[in-house]
Amino acid sequence: MSGRGRLALCAWAATLMAACALLPLVEPVTWIVQAAFLLGVQTVVGAATRRIPLARPLTVAVQALVTLMMLTLIFARDQAFLGLIPGPDAFVHFGDLLRQGGDDIARYAIPAPLASEGIKLMVFGGVLIVGLVVDTLAVTFRSAAPAGLPLLALYSVAAGLSEGHGDWFWFLVAAIGYLMLLLAEGRDRLSQWGRVFGGAPRSPGADSGPVAPVRTGRRIGVASLGIALVVSATLPSMNGGLLDATGAGVGAGNGSGGTISAVNPLLSLRDSLNVDEDRQVLSVRTQSNDTADLYLRIVSLDDFDGRTWKPSKRSIGAVPKDFPTPIGLGPDVRRTEVETTISAANWYEQSYLPMPYPPSGVQVRGNWRYEPEGMALVGDHGQNTRGLTYDVKSLDVEPTAEQLAAAPAAPPAIEREYTDLPDSLPAVVAKTAREVTAGAQNPYEQAVDLQDYFAINGGFEYDTQVEVGDGPNAIANFLRDKQGFCVHFSFAMAAMARSLGIPARVAVGFAPGTPQADGSVSVGLKDAHAWPELYFEGVGWTRFEPTPTRGTVPSYTIPDAGGSVDPGVARPSAGTSTAPSASPSASESCAPQLRKLEACDSASPAAAAAKGGGGPWWAVQGPWWYLKLLFWLLVGVAVLSVPLAPMLWRLRTRSVRLGGHGRSDADAAAHTLAVWQELTDTAWDFGIPPEDSQTPRKAAARIVRLGHLDPAVAASVHRVADAVEQVLYAPRPRLTAGLVQDVHRVIGGLRGSVSRTTRVRALIAPRSTARTMWAVSEWWAGVRTRVAAARPTLRKPSGQEG
């Protein structure tokens, strides 16, 4: 293998080793094999174009084109010509996928699923772009030391998004790849004639040489290490994902106390509700016979600044063995203790522990802290729910409508804290609350009127596509537009309740999931939910459900219901079984209104597979997609090579003529004649056809005259012509230095003296490629001559004597 081939292989390996830092972020980890294949194709294309050889910019352009074609074939084949050549629609699709990927990064916890096309494009596209830059710097331009910067960028992004586990290991892997690249370049430099692998001169008067790559690499390595440490510490973490409750100060206690800071866990709730695949987050088993009220609460939001709701800064302590009685819950209210076992998915990382409210005891392994105000557990020192199974004892509180209606005023401290509203809240919020509750006799009836206004008779529609909004007019806009999802409904009802003097806050967690055949309840991404909690003395914090078509309306909000729930008032939260269905999708015949209410069936993977024959015949599917990808890449390269063949042949010919020669006087004739032929062919490409009957001196004068060349360029033409006459007529031809530079000077002069159209034609369709046809014609004539000469020996004897 040549030195440049070894360098290309090391660049491929270094990029792949740096990409390994992304392994903890995305699953399944087999994506690294696919990335290695795509990087290999990119590297082979670069090696092939350098072998031709093409000019350096053209080498980079061809690699970039092949990379774009690979990404098009994988991600945008339906929007591309022949599934391979991207057009405007393909680039629009790429933009949509990148936006989707950005949303999915905020939505999913580590490791994110590669099933997300947006994340997949960001991973493969990022690795291929870094690989292209590394190959360009280290191999095409033979400068391996700066190639450490894109490798650092790839590692830094991975380190910034990861939790910090094993960062040192992945940094070591990436560093080994970079050092391997530096050593390969050093070996390549030593193997080249006339190149010095050394540093600056150590003494005055010594010959200076190029700076050693090892020294440059050492400097860049030190800078890279410092940048990596800074970037890893400053980039935002991806460890929260769904309902991200992590952030500065969360769970940062020292084991004996501390606080949790105000963070907003609603950043990705809307994205969770809009996912295409309703992944299971939690599996729940409970002793309760009624799972319709099994809400899993994560955290409460009690700080309202007029723009959004968020948790207040609270003190945390050790988890008590037996939780205290919930604040405000009196002895006369009926309650039942229920035991529940919850198992979190191995990809779901949440710093708060989802639990039924109010909990009375928790058995959970790990480092958890207790926040008494919200009766919540928060992870300490990076503790989270990933793959965790835990047992919760909770109280099923069953107040009656009479008890809530007769509730006395809340304590002053609670009323002061939980009825506080900012001055920036638009007046229409309080005005609407008063209008809706005009006939209510007590706070309980006011709360029920507010709930019914949003869920039943107010004309509101459930729509997860509406932006959350955090401006001072967000609630007012929602009351005007009457479209939104659980965040809008819970925020608005809590704010309106506070305006009426009812203590209120917002809870975030999961609505009741979907019962399974094995007796468990599956809680998925689309069960993510927010609901208001209002305080009633003697009962405590009480759940209400203003969001239509989501969750269940509490029985105590329906007077004279006898504990039953009107099925027309509320429905269980929409969920799907984790088992795939083989039935076809009904979404095509589903009405738009039902789609908005998420009441349409979606096609399951099993149903899609049962249909068969999906996609065009050339689509990349199945386990042999590598071969299909390679096949279509070759087809695309072949298609593009046909119109580009004259240009590629001309560039190759020029490179051979000006570069392929020896360095002694014995090679003077071959080198000089090749340079002269390149000069005359270049003039032909720019519209000056050759005249072989003229002497080199006259041909040079003709080129200067017709090409309108300035004196400096004209001198270069005549120097080449003089060198040709010298090797043709001198007894002992000598090698003339500087002829290649003279030809390049002439090429620049001719290019500058013609129009843009002539320049483009000289590049894309050079006239001198006619020599190829002449060569083919001469070859064919030679073949015919040799065949004709061989015919007498092939004839059978005639049988005649003499």
Image (spheres, rainbow, N blue to C red):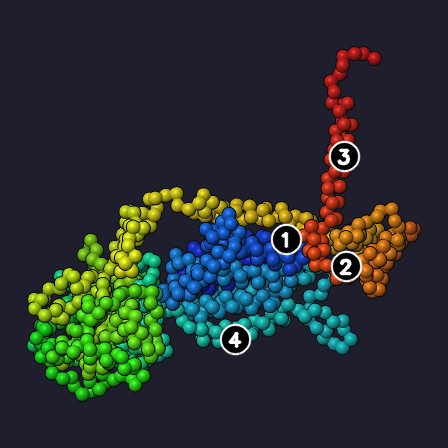
Nearer the observer: mark 1 or 2; the answer is 2
Tell me whether circle 2 and circle 3 mark residues in contact (CB < 8 Å): no
- The answer to which of 621 and 80 lies nearer the viewer is 80
Residue that carries the numbered disc 4 in the rendered image: 226
- The answer to which of 242 and 427 lies nearer the viewer is 427
Tell me whether circle 4 and circle 3 mark residues in contact (CB < 8 Å): no
Residue that carries the numbered disc 1 in the rendered image: 49
Q: Compared with residue 381, is residue 517 higher up or lower down, i.e. above or below?
A: above
Gap between marks 2 and 3, in whole Å? 36 Å
The secondary structure type at the circle numbered 2 is helix
Labels 4 and 3: the sequence-earlier one: 4
Labels 3 and 1: the sequence-earlier one: 1
Quarter occupied by the C terminus: top right
Q: Specify the label residue 750 is tagged with.
A: 2
Labels 4 and 2: the sequence-earlier one: 4
Which amino acid, by three-letter code, is at mark 3?
Gly
Q: Compared with residue 575, is residue 320 higher up or lower down, i.e. above or below?
A: below
Residue that carries the numbered disc 3 in the rendered image: 782
Residue 710, quarter of picture = bottom right
Gap between marks 1 and 2, in whole Å? 26 Å
Decide if residue 120 is on the left or right side of residue 554. right
Labels 1 and 2: the sequence-earlier one: 1
Residue 779 in view here:
yes
Nearer the observer: mark 2 or 3; the answer is 2
Q: Residues within 10 Å of mark 4 (few under 14, many from 20)?
A: few
Residue 343, quarter of picture = bottom left
Q: Position of residue 358 (x, y in %)?
A: 18, 73
The secondary structure type at the circle numbered 3 is helix
